[in-house]
Image: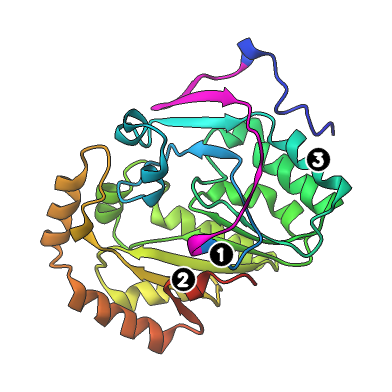
Amino acid sequence: MDLFSNIEQEEESRKNKLGHADIEYVKSVGILTQAKGFMESYDYTLNPYSGCSFGCNYCYAAFFARSTEQKDNWGKWVKVKDNALQLLIKWRKKPLIDKTIYISSVTDPYQPIEKELELTRSILNELVNYHKPRLVIQTRSPLITRDIDLLTKFDVVQVNMTVTTDSEDVRKAFEPICPSNKSRLKAIQEVTASGIQTCITMTPLLPLQNPNEFVKELLNTGVKKFIVQPFHPEKGKFVASTRELAIEQMKKMNWNESKYNEAVEVFRKELPWLGEGKQGFAPI
């Protein structure tokens, strides 16, 4: 299969809108970014897209958007880094063997448009055939299961699936455009069953209906590694005018710091491995 076939389409055949999100195709100056800050323990971060059509209303990445308009419309736009594969191919002169790469830090590599473009898939194909880095892939999309065939070829890879709550009402308040909790758990169960190392990231942990039952759901996936972080609503970082609905849901479920701590105590007791905060995201 020609690696370029999925991204070098005729302009008129490309979708400029998918569902609620505007799609723009851009040329990027680079595809690998030296990791720093929260990701400083990695060598590089890799983001095939910018923006994110999942549009979680608490997303920190929204505040790295380049304009007020982009911040205000977070979740409604995605930029495709059209030359991402070509940029990565240039690294063949200096292969990324054993380099630690986090995919992705400020977007989800499995945007809905990825199903058609296969941009992330082409990047994985390039990495496994010419570089063999150590990968951690972060997503909240069941589309990750499509690439199990490629992921099993890596010597060192971990797939992180974000699952932030056991409640669909909470999910709809905070992550209204995201895949359901059940579909994410089913997907990471499938990835785990294929022999790939996996992790469920409850980052941030949103209000729960029943921590004990949630733990059972988590363990039923076969995943052995988990990460948790608190959600800080007082910081006010809500996008797309969603603060009111989200805060209302938190009050309805009487969710507060005490409830969070109670849930984490259950996790510490029942889960086989629990990372808390930044240390949980350390490279494998």
| Residue 84 in picture, x, y percent from top left | 68, 36
Q: Specify the label residue 89 is tagged with.
A: 3
Q: Is residue 165 left or right of residue 94?
A: left
Q: CA distance from mark 2 to mark 1?
A: 10 Å
Segment colored magenta = 14-38
Examine the rendered structure and indicate whether residue 150 appears above or below residue 54.
below
Precedes in sequence: disc 2 or disc 3: 3
Which quadrant is home to the C terminus?
bottom right
Precedes in sequence: disc 1 or disc 3: 1
Q: Dot 1: few (<14), some (14–19), or many (≥20) neighbours within 10 Å?
A: some
Give the SS element for disc 3: helix
Q: Specify the label residue 40 is tagged with.
A: 1
Give the SS element for disc 2: helix
Q: CA distance from mark 1 to mark 3?
A: 24 Å
Three-letter code, disc 3: Ile
Q: Residue at x 52, y 23 (%)?
A: 24
| Residue 51 in picture, x, y percent from top left | 46, 37
- C-beta proximity under 8 Å, tags 2 and 3: no
Q: Specify the label residue 278 is tagged with.
A: 2
Q: Residue at x 78, y 50 (%)?
A: 127
Count of picture labels: 3
Three-letter code, disc 1: Glu
